[in-house]
Image (cartoon, rainbow, N blue to C red):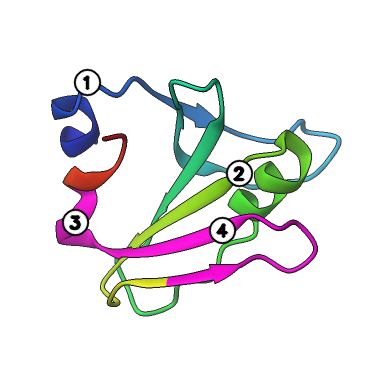
Amino acid sequence: MQALTANGVETFYWMPKPTVGSGEVDFVYQTGRAEVVPVEVKSGRNVRARSPRRLVEEGCAPKEHRLSEQNYSESVIEGTGCTLAGLPLYAAFTLGS
């Protein structure tokens, strides 16, 4: 969050409606083009997360960021056309710029 705040990015927290199920997204920010972008932070090696995917599908987000111990990666999320960008934790300062 410090890296996003330092870049002047206002962050939000997202949870689905209680009737939909459980989950959460660590950070959500809005781009200058009014696009909502979820950011999931994973401290361990397990980087699976369903909640950001739900936000991508329901909120029509164009991309998703995942910060973790793993190296840079990029893939297309099946069925959405959305890009999943994997970033190492130390690269959080690049988000929102």
Q: Check disc 3 and report the residue beneath it.
A: 91
Q: Give the residue displayed 59% in from the left and 50% down from the top.
A: 52
The amino acid at mark 4 is Thr
10 to the left or right of 7: right
Q: Residue at x 30, y 77 (%)?
A: 70
Residue on which disc 2 sits? 62
Tag 3: amino acid: Ala
Q: Could you tell which of marks 3 and 1 lies nearer the N-terminus?
A: 1
Q: CA distance from mark 1 to mark 4?
A: 23 Å
Magenta span covers which residues?
Answer: 74-92
Closer-to-camera residue (83/17): 83
List x then y, in percent, for residue 92.
Answer: 22, 49
Contact check, label 3 and label 1, Cβ < 8 Å: no
Secondary structure at numbered mark 2: loop
SS of the residue under disc 3: helix
Dot placed on the residue nearer the N-terminal end, 3 or 2: 2
Which sits earlier in the primary sequence, circle 1 or circle 4? 1
- Closer to the chain start, of discs 4 and 2, is 2
Is 19 inside the magenta-drawn segment? no
Picture disc at residue 83 = 4
